[in-house]
Amino acid sequence: MVKFSDDVTQGVEKSAARAMLRAVGLQDEDFEKFQVGIVSAGNEVTPCNLTGPELSEHAKDGVNGDVSAGLIFSTIAVSDGISMGHEGMRASLVSREVIADSVELVMHAERFDGMVTIAGCDKSLPGMLMASARINRPSIFLYGGSSLPGEYKGKDISIVDVFEGIGALEKGLITEEELYEIECAACPGQGSCAGMFTANTMASVGEAIGMSLPGTASIQAEDQRLRKAAKETGDQLNYLLKNDLKPRDIMTKEAFHNAITTVLSLGGSTNAVLHLLAIAYEAKVDLTIDVFDELARKVPHLADMKPFGKYHMVDLDKIGGVPVVSKILLENKLIDPNCMTVTGKTVGENLEDIEVPKDQDVVYFPDNPISKEGGLAILRGSLSPNGSVVKVAGIEIDTFKGPANVFDSEQEALDALFNNKIKKGEVVVIRNEGPKGGPGMREMLQITAAMKGAGLGKDVLLITDGRFSGGTTGLCIGHVTPESFDNGPIAICETGDEISLDLKKRELNLNVDEDEIEKRLKKYSNPEPRYNSGVLNKYSKLVTGADRGAVTG
């Protein structure tokens, strides 16, 4: 294999570079070894990434030895939970690209031969996997761990319960004191959100696609097993380096299908569609949104996980974690056993000794699933010609029809909800929130949770060219493409227009005459950009549509 680090460690002309490396702790013998970057999104901005610095040190202990010398660096992360429901959320998806770009730049400049990537929150996980696929040097991923659920009045709760509580308070269903008590109890410590929201979904993807050591996706952030796993992860990178096993050797088309199948069986986040498309783009794997729906027709929903079910990630961990889910899928010939993984073994080999516990109800079996089809669906139709995404897990109806109530931003819709201007039977349309038009494709847990908390979760259909939190449940359709900025039909939808949904047919239609749609589109012009400078302006000019993963490459 190419030893990139020779560019900074070998020859008299590299004396200055070695002098700098000596200053950070390397010695003569280290200059003959592989140089390894150990990168985390560790910070105090979000509890999701609090473990990053500590886990980096344990990973470094695993890396360092006769084969490799490790050096720690870091990248950014933002908190979706903190940035939710205001202008700050426009930075969230953008941060995924910044994370991937920043890791690439450090790896390129420092000439590291391989890397250990550590991340916890929603965008840092896919950002690390994107960077690994793009750079394509031996790499391995470690999840920073999920949090434990909080407890309130004898029930497990999470951050989603706080957002729902805001809507309940507005409708007078709970008191301000009760909301305060929920707020104080929801996040008991470090780690990512406890349910099968986006972070835990993408951690499961890390395992399912073969880039993480088996069993590491479900370990809680405060569990000492995670420290041990970090050291083992660092040590395993040495194997990858010695054998020149790179991310694109692992993240094949078949591996992506395994990952998608796992997400569908878990009832995972809609954001997984966006992120897997982006990772596939970097891995140079041809993947389209239609694959998600093709597999969803064949893959049953098996895991009874929050936000729609009973259990949190800690409960899945107690029965054996993602390997148990993978073993069930393998036994039913739903995943490919021949895909290579970072262990140096195939998926099938990794699962040989996994036993599936029978006396549990966290994960069901294909002969008696929660649902015969997977937890996500891709919709097309006159309102979303290029596709849209819905989490069908937990939805109890197949069809919905009603008049549109159109808003040009999430905040407009939220204000309308709090002023009793959203009624049962309506279709709430929120546009100008796509990757380009937002910019940034805001996540809308604030409005979806508030609607649920207000008792409208089953009676109002919400449609947007933005996206949703992994904690969102109910009648919510996102990623509508083309987005309004690209003159998609959502741009010319008017209040009072009839909109219909048919989940069985996978259709989302604006029931307006085609000639009328064309007439409206000819008259339509985009609103003025929200940002005329800075990173959000730059992002809006570079980003693709959600149906292509909202990538900027």
Image: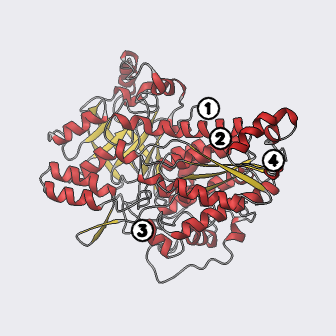
In this rendering, which labeled residue sits more in front, label 4 or label 2? 4
Contact, mark 1 vs mark 2 (Cβ under 8 Å):
yes
Alpha carbon of mark 3 to alpha carbon of mark 2: how far? 32 Å
Residue matched to label 3: 304
Q: Earlier in the sequence, mark 1 or mark 4?
A: 4
Which amino acid, mark 1? Gly
* Above or below: residue 192 compared with residue 487: below
The quadrant holding residue 210 is bottom right
Q: Residue furthest right?
A: 11
Residue matched to label 1: 553
Alpha carbon of mark 1 to alpha carbon of mark 4: how far? 34 Å
Measured as percent of width and height from the top left, residue 248 is found at 72, 48
Q: Tell me the SS state at disc 1.
A: loop
Out of 148 and 70, give the one closest to the viewer: 70
Alpha carbon of mark 1 to alpha carbon of mark 2: how far? 8 Å
Alpha carbon of mark 3 to alpha carbon of mark 1: how far? 37 Å
Residue lying at 85% horizontally and 32% vertically, measured from the top left? 13
Q: Earlier in the sequence, mark 1 or mark 2?
A: 2
Which amino acid, mark 2? Glu
Measured as percent of width and height from the top left, residue 58 is found at 61, 61
Q: How is the image coloured?
A: secondary structure
Q: Is residue 285 visible?
A: no
Q: Label 2 crowding class (10 Å Cα cut-off): few <14, some 14-19, many 20+?
A: many
